[in-house]
Image (spheres, rainbow, N blue to C red):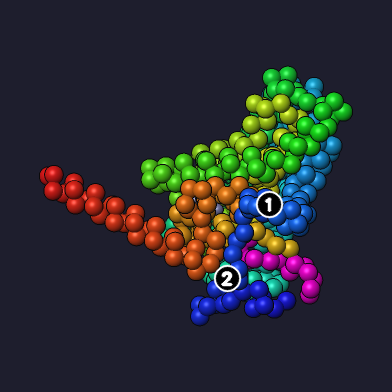
C-alpha cells in the first residue's frame, strides 16, 4: 500500500496521517445520521468484536465453574494468570513479531521512523525498551489484571454482585455491552488525568511514559499502581447490575485493548489492498507530547471538553503550543512572585 496517499512523511522519516482525528459522529449537531450509520461498523469491528469474542471464549473455555470460584485458592487464579499471559504473548507478540521484528511493512504508516530496538536508553531496565516493557507487562501488569479478574469473579460467584441473566434482561445487557467502551473511556480518562498530576506523574506514570516511541510491548508497561487502577475498570460491574461475561468484556477492552494506542502504525496491512486501522494516533500524540489526549480517540470527547485535544492537524498543534506557552507564562509569573516574596 502507498502510505503517501493517506499521509505525509517529514525529513526525519516520521509519517503522519492527512486529515484530523474525528470525534464520534453522534456528537455532531445537527445530528448526522448517515455518518453515525457508517461509524457503527467501525465501532464494532474489528476491535470491540474481538474483545467480545475473547470474553466469550474465556467464559466458555477458560473460567472455572462457579463452585470452584467461591473459594479463593492459588490454583484457579494462577491458571487464569497463565491464560492471560499466554493470550497477551500471542496477541501482542504477533504484532511485535510481524511489524517490529520482521518488519513486514517496513516504515509504511509508521508514525516514528525509528524502531525502539534501535534506541537503547538508560531509563529502561537493561537499557532496552523491549526487555523493560516486556518484564513490566508480564511480571507486574498482567498479574494485577488477574487480581482484578479473580476479585470480580469471586464476587459474582459469592453473590456479592448483582448477577443479571441474559434470558431475563437481554436488552439491558446488550446495552451494557454497547456502552462498555464508553465506561472504559471515562474511567481511563479520569485515572490517567489523575496520574498526570505532578507528584503522581513522577512517582507512578513516568514509568509508562519512558516509552516516547511506543511499541506493542509498551501497552501494559506500567507502575503497579497504574496497572491496578487501569484494569480496575472491570470492578464497575460489581457496582452496576451486570453479568460476568460483560465484566470480562470490560476487562478485555482494557487488557487486550491497551495495544491499540501503542501499535505505532496507523494501519496494519493485511493484504496488498486491505488494512486494519489501529486507532493509535491520538495516544501516539499523547506519548509524544505528554499533555494532550488523555482519553482515547474521541468516543467521548473529554479532551475536547477539557481543552487538551490534539486532533493531529496543524491547528491542533498550534492550540497545544499556545496552551503550553500559557502554562509556561503562568509558571514564570508564579516563580517571580515567590522570588519577590523572599
Ligand atoms: Zn500509553
Ligand atoms: Zn500519560
Q: Which mark is residue 16?
A: 2
User: In the rendered image, which quarter contains the N terminus?
Assistant: bottom right
Question: Quarter of the image holding residue 291?
Answer: bottom left
Say if residue 91 shows up in the picture: no
Q: Could you tell whether 18 is left or right of 203 in the image?
A: right
Question: Front-most of 321 and 125?
Answer: 321
Question: How dense is the environment of label 1, judged by Cα within 10 Å: few (below 14), some, or many (20 and up)?
Answer: few
Query: At 69% from the left edge and 40% from the top edge, which residue is drawn?
Result: 180
Query: At 56% from the left edge and 56% from the top edge, which residue is drawn?
Result: 283
Q: CA distance from mark 2 to mark 1?
A: 29 Å
Q: Which mark is residue 31?
A: 1
Work out which residue is located at the far front of the displayed protein and give it: 30
Q: SS at mark 1?
A: loop
Disc 2 residue lies near ligand 1 with CB under 8 A: no
How many discs appear?
Answer: 2
Q: SS at mark 2?
A: strand
Residue 299 coordinates in the image, percent (x, y): 64, 49
Find the magenta span and give its range.
Answer: 263-275
Say if residue 292 shows up in the picture: yes
Which secondary structure type mostly characterizes the magenta part of the structure? loop
Residue 265 drawn in magenta: yes
Residue 91 coordinates in the image, percent (x, y): 72, 54
Question: Front-most of 181 and 227?
Answer: 181
Q: Could you tell whether 162 is left or right of 342 in the image?
A: right
Amino acid at each position: 500500500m502507498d502510505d503517501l496517499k493517506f499521509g505525509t512523511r517529514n525529513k526525519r522519516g516520521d509519517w503522519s496521517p492527512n486529515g484530523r482525528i474525528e470525534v464520534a459522529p453522534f456528537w455532531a449537531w445537527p445530528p448526522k445520521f448517515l455518518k453515525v450509520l457508517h461509524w457503527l461498523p467501525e465501532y464494532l469491528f474489528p476491535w470491540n468484536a474481538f474483545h467480545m469474542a475473547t470474553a466469550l471464549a474465556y467464559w466458555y473455555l477458560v473460567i472455572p465453574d462457579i463452585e470452584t470460584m467461591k473459594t479463593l485458592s492459588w490454583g484457579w487464579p494462577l491458571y487464569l494468570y497463565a491464560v492471560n499471559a499466554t493470550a497477551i504473548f500471542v496477541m501482542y507478540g504477533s504484532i511485535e513479531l510481524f511489524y517490529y521484528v520482521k518488519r513486514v511493512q517496513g516504515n509504511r504508516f509508521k508514525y516514528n521512523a525509528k524502531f525502539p530496538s534501535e534506541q537503547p536508553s538508560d531509563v529502561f531496565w537493561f537499557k532496552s525498551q523491549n526487555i523493560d516493557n516486556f518484564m513490566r507487562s508480564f511480571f507486574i501488569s498482567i498479574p494485577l489484571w488477574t487480581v482484578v479478574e479473580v476479585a470480580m469473579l469471586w464476587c459474582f460467584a459469592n453473590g456479592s454482585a448483582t448477577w443479571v441473566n441474559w434470558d431475563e434482561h437481554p436488552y439491558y445487557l446488550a446495552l451494557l455491552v454497547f456502552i462498555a467502551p464508553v465506561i472504559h473511556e471515562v474511567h481511563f480518562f479520569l485515572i490517567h488525568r489523575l496520574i498526570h498530576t505532578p507528584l503522581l506523574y513522577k512517582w507512578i506514570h513516568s514509568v509508562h511514559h519512558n516509552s516516547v516511541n511506543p511499541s506493542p510491548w509498551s501497552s501494559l508497561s506500567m507502575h503497579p499502581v497504574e496497572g491496578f487502577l487501569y484494569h480496575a475498570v472491570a470492578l464497575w460491574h460489581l457496582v452496576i447490575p451486570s453479568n460476568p461475561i460483560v465484566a470480562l468484556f470490560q476487562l478485555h477492552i482494557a487488557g487486550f485493548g491497551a495495544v491499540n494506542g501503542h501499535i505505532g502504525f496507523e494501519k496494519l496491512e493485511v493484504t496488498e489492498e486491505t488494512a486494519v486501522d489501529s486507532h493509535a494516533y491520538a495516544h501516539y500524540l499523547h506519548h509524544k507530547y505528554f499533555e494532550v489526549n488523555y482519553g482515547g480517540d474521541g468516543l467521548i470527547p473529554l479532551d475536547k471538553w477539557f481543552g487538551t485535544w490534539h486532533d493531529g492537524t496543524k491547528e491542533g498543534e498550534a492550540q497545544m503550543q499556545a496552551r503550553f506557552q500559557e502554562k509556561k507564562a503562568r509558571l514564570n509569573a508564579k516563580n517571580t512572585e515567590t522570588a519577590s516574596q523572599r
